[in-house]
Image (tube, rainbow, N blue to C red):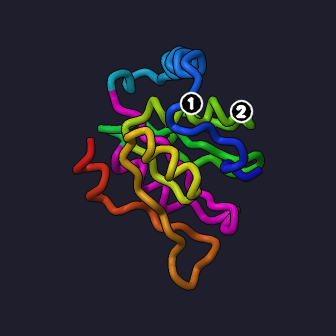
Amino acid sequence: MKFHAGLPSSNSVPAHEIERMRAFIQAHTLPGNAGKPICVIEPWSASFRGGDNLSWDAWIAARASHWRFWQIGRRFDSAVEGCEYYFWTPNRSRIAALIAQSKAFVGSDPELLRLAGSLGIPVFTVQPEPHAPTRHRAPDAEFLTANR
């Protein structure tokens, strides 16, 4: 599944999906995470599937005291440890509504990066590590520290 097919534009995220997502987030907030901003991550690009996510686990663990993380996934992808919720749905409007509720987006999918940026959400692009196409480098530590 590629995310970019049929994603809504920034001005067409349905209001009912935004409200539905707010309620969904509230219902799935773990104890101790209320009040923390959400950072949505999408760590796997379509061309680099199945990578080692140990660097993501450590990156999230180092920031979990200030942020909560929701992962957008694709079917059969592994979940990154430390994420509050692994969000998988083929519904593009719900993906857009989740991103609209976040305070930061970290990922590699160009369409999701453009969508988050068009919604005014700070974005950070993850690039594959050189000479290791199945691994991803965790984002720079300064990004979420400066943008919390």
Viewer-side residue, 135 vs 1: 1
Q: How many marks?
A: 2
Indicate the amino acid at tag 1: Ser
Q: Which residue is mark 2?
A: 91
Image point (31%, 59%), residue name = 141
Residue 38: say if magenta.
yes
Crowd rating for badge 2 (residues with CA inside 10 Å; few <14, some 14–19, many 20+): few
At x 68%, y 48%, the residue is 3
Mark 1 vs mark 2, foreground winner is 1
Whether residue 32 is situated above or below residue 96 in the rendered picture: above
- Residue 17 visible, this orientation: yes
Q: Which quadrant holds residue 94?
A: top right
Q: Is residue 85 magenta?
A: no
139 lies left or right of 86:
left
Q: Amino acid at mark 2?
A: Asn
Q: Secondary structure at mark 2?
A: loop
Q: Which residue is mark 1?
A: 12
Q: Earlier in the sequence, mark 1 or mark 2?
A: 1
Q: Is residue 104 above or below residue 54?
A: above
Q: Residue at x 58, y 52 (%)?
A: 111
Q: Is residue 132 above or below residue 71?
A: below
Looking at the picture, how far across and down is residue 2, in whole percent?
72, 52
Residue that extends furthest to the left in the rendered view of this protein: 146
Determine the secondary structure under disc 1: helix
Q: Quadrant of the C terminus?
A: top left
Disc on res. 101: none
Q: Residue at x 26, y 58 (%)?
A: 142
Horizontal placement of 17 versus 84: left or right?
right
Please state the extent of the stretch shown in magenta in the rendering. 36-63
Q: CA distance from mark 1 to mark 2?
A: 14 Å
